[in-house]
Image: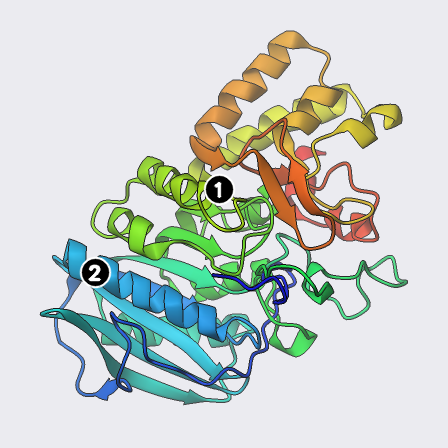
Amino acid sequence: MDKPDAILRRLPAAAATLLAAVALALTAAACSGDDPDEGPEPPGQTERTLLMYLPWSTDLTSYFENNISEMGQAALAHGLDGERVLVYMCTAADAAVLFELLPDGQECRRQTLKTYQSPEYTTAGGIASMLRDVRSLAPARSYAMTIGCHGMGWVPVNEAGSRAGGEPPRPHWQYAGGPLTRYFGGFTKDVQTDVVTLAEGIELADMHMEFILFDDCFMSSVEAAYDLRHAADWLIACPTEIMARGMPYDAIGAHLLGTPDYAAVCSEFLSFYSSYSYPYGTIGVTRTDQLDSLARVVRKIEAAGTLDSALRPYLQRMDGYSPPIFYDLGDYIAAICTDEELLAEFNAQLARTVPYKAHTSSYYSAITGAEPIRAYSGITTSAPTRSRYADDWRLTEWYAATH
């Protein structure tokens, strides 16, 4: 259970960062306990390899350990029929280990496959090299990936905060005194990864993913999804911050293993967070082959109308920043589209693009606390933002496709 005096756990995803100094405490019931066993990797190609990718994070390592343990529990309960589960985890900012989860009777062992010194997890080449190791050590007909970290959607890694210059917004992970949330990356630029860099790394490795699950804040962003549309068939992510507890893998793991059941993932996620000590959770599942069609509809709408500035304060914001960076996509389009037929076309395409989603009645912000949800698409946009990131937003592929 998150402690109220912890810090919030997730943030920049395109500007992704991680720093953490919690030593590996392999003590949870399943897939915990003893140090990973050294041993040769099992040979042969399987149906699918699922990779849990956990880059360096100073404040999330203990939560990652729980995530791994819960995935081990899911593997024990569900079984791994023609599937392997690997974990790449940074044990320090300059060290990482790749190991496999092996259900064995009543426990899930860890078998070390490779260790890394000074891994380049913030570059496309470094990510591609790691993924090639996964393919070499656990060859499969298809691959899938979960990413646990802090996240900030499409927002790029930029030391100055934005191309507009000036001071960037104070990131949500810097707000102490409340429950911890996550974000994709670490606290400083040297341990942050851009979403476009992740996409490029996957492309370089030639390892198209069946799905990518982001266990990070703000990653259900249409701009980030558009950057990743050629990297994976499906994206599972949260449009708001997610509590440091992260995804409930013991509940959703069975629906990720084997044939994915995305509706069940959303249902289990909602069930868990509805009764959690901090009852705030949002999730959306994006079908990437529908994103170009969505962009074409949005382009027609953007060409036909503009946002009345008087309406901006009433849009469904999905963060606690001032000014907001992330807004609900459907609510934004409803505010600028006066053509009912065109709006209906958009809504139908949005339903095809984000077919599964769920949310509690409120979302949580490390900055402002609980915020009500009155409109929900399962995915956000930064089109209405007036933040210092606005200039960066106009350089995204999504902007180019819709303007």
The relative height of residue 242 versus residue 150 in the rendered view (above or below) is: above
393, 189: nearer the viewer? 189
Q: Residue type at mark 2: give it.
A: Ala
User: The C terminus is located in which quarter?
Assistant: top right
The relative height of residue 204 versus residue 284 in the rendered view (above or below) is: below
Of mark 2 and mark 1, the one earlier in the sequence is 2
In the rendered image, the residue lying farthest to the left is 105
**Residue beneath label 2, please?**
75
Q: What element carries label 1?
A: strand
Q: Residue type at mark 1: give it.
A: Ile
Residue 279 on image: x %, y %: 52, 44
**C-alpha span from label 2 to label 1:** 23 Å
| Label annotation for residue 283 | 1
Residue occupying the point 48% across, 74% down: 61
Q: Is mark 2 on a helix, strand or loop?
A: helix
Give yes or no for contact between labels 2 and 1 (Cβ–Cβ under 8 Å). Answer: no
